[in-house]
Image: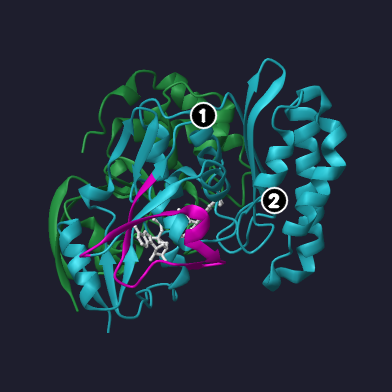
Amino acid sequence: MKIKLSFRLNGESITLATEPLKRLLDLLRDQLELTGTKEGCGEGECGACAVLIDDRLMNACLVPAAVLEGKNIITIEGYRTTAQFKILKSCFEKAGAVQCGFCTPGMLLAAEALLRQKPKPTAEEVRAGLAGNLCRCTGYNMIVEAVLLAAKEGEGLWSTPVGL
Amino acid sequence: MVNACRPLSLEEALVMRSREATTVFAGGSDLMVRYRQWSGVTPDFSGTVLFVGHLPELQRLDREKDTWKIGAACTITQILQAQGIPDHLKLPLLSMASPSIRNVATLGGNICNASPAGDTLPMLYALDARLTLQSRDNARTVAIADFITGPGKTILAADEILTEITIPPGDWPRVYYKKAGTRRANSISKVTFYAVARFDGDRIADIRMAFGAAAPTVVRNPAAEALLQNIDKNQVPAWLETLTTHYADALRPIDDLRSTGKYRQQTALRILAHFLRRELA
Ligand SMILES: Cc1cc2nc3c(=O)[nH]c(=O)nc-3n(C[C@H](O)[C@H](O)[C@H](O)COP(=O)(O)OP(=O)(O)OC[C@H]3O[C@@H](n4cnc5c(N)ncnc54)[C@H](O)[C@@H]3O)c2cc1C
Ligand code: FES
Ligand code: FES
């Protein structure tokens, strides 16, 4: 069984046919060829597949296609065109928060979700905000530092909508 | 073959449920893991999947006087962000999973999943939460303790949907929640403990305590709670031994995790002792 589905993806309206229980992760990577969203664990633990759905951080490995009707989805491919991304990118670079990079797309979107809720987070709050994202390389300190730096350098940015 | 149905109203969902065997899908954070296959392959649900997470009837979150009525499909995030939600409801939710899981996980899903380690369950037992189960032609209200019968087992009938969770009024200035052991999708919290109390000066006016993951279902012992009623909080340590015997019987190791059963019982009793000695006084 296939269903017809309409939603917004990175600012564009999309209509497609798919199996209702296909994971958004597979839809993105296989059908839409957006491979910036990564698969780590496939069971909600690692956050490598994190995307924003209606401005909320969600793991694409746990989201079936059928619930996407009418939703607004932002993946790293869309997010990288925004002003918020530019700040985060430069702060991740400055803090040395990227090594192999596998966790980075999910980390960036988790950071976006966090900063939108708490534009001036403490280190503790950053850790809580990124708690669902695993990184096997950096040991997290550099990532926390990067997000704190972004909060400072991008002050005010997180009160304006992501331009998508 | 998998069928899927995304009804537009609760009524439509209940009609569907009365006609065929369906799997109710709320946030899917348990179901998508349970039925996952491998990368690129659609999860292996059998039968018809009935999506209910979007239904407005299950998304209400109201306070009537001091009674909270929470729609079964409210997510943990929605509850945490609701206006005026008291700390005694918030505390266990804050230690549940990560933000991205809390954004999809629903309260109804945590209850119906009936995991002994479900983070919301000790709180719901301690607060005497009541559940509304609705079918096409009927609605019934049951106490949470009567709803869950074992690990993953509930009395939900094949044609019913859990629609609402009712939390009776209660003023609980003292709230405590302890989660021993980390919770991962495939492992289970070692032990959880939730307690609330109210004082009248130094006297315990009311106290409720519940353990999760220490037995097949949540353990609450009203007789033990009654022992503490009306006693001075400084006298509590003197009651510790009596209370320990009261609880030791009820804290039975979980069958399928036998090897850690003893550890769990000891941990549970140690948390209880810590709470009574250090947190309450
Ligand atoms: C990475 C990860 C971390 C997690 N961490 C925690 C944690 O720390 N603590 C914790 O307690 N849980 C945790 N969980 C488990 C899960 O997120 C929760 O149990 C959640 O509350 C389930 O809600 P859901 O809406 O996603 O359930 P679903 O997966 O949609 O459903 C769960 C079960 O309930 C049934 N159901 C759901 N809603 C209804 C309804 N309204 N009426 C009738 N039946 C219904 C479904 O048929 C299914 O059997 C975690 C899960 C993952 C993947
Ligand atoms: S792949 Fe989705 S959380 Fe790990
Ligand atoms: S940089 Fe390699 S997993 Fe985070």
Q: Which chain is cyan?
A: B
The quarter of the picture where the N terminus of chain B appears is bottom left
Q: Which residue is mark 2?
A: B181
> x, y percentage for residue A14?
14, 57
A52 left or right, relative to A10: right
The quarter of the picture where the C terminus of chain B appears is top right
| Mark 2 CB within 8 Å of ligand 1 | no
Q: Chain of mark 2?
A: B
Q: Residue at x 68, y 73 (%)?
A: B256
Q: Camera-side residue: A129 or B142? A: B142
First in sequence: mark 1 vs mark 2: 1
User: Is B228 contained in the magenta span?
Assistant: no
Residue A102 visible within the image = no
Q: Is residue A131 above or below residue A46?
A: above
In the figure, the shade used to draw chain A is green
Q: Are marks 1 and 2 on the same chain?
A: yes
> x, y percentage for residue A77?
30, 49
Callout 1 secondary element: helix
User: Is B139 contained in the magenta span?
Assistant: yes
| Amino acid beneath label 1 | Asp
Label 2: few (<14), some (14–19) or many (≥20) C-alpha neighbours in 10 Å:
few
| Amino acid beneath label 2 | Gly
B97 left or right, relative to A60: right
Q: Chain of mark 1?
A: B
Residues in magenta, as a range: B136-165
Q: Residue furthest top?
A: B201
> x, y percentage for residue B96?
53, 45
Q: Is residue B101 above or below residue B274?
A: below
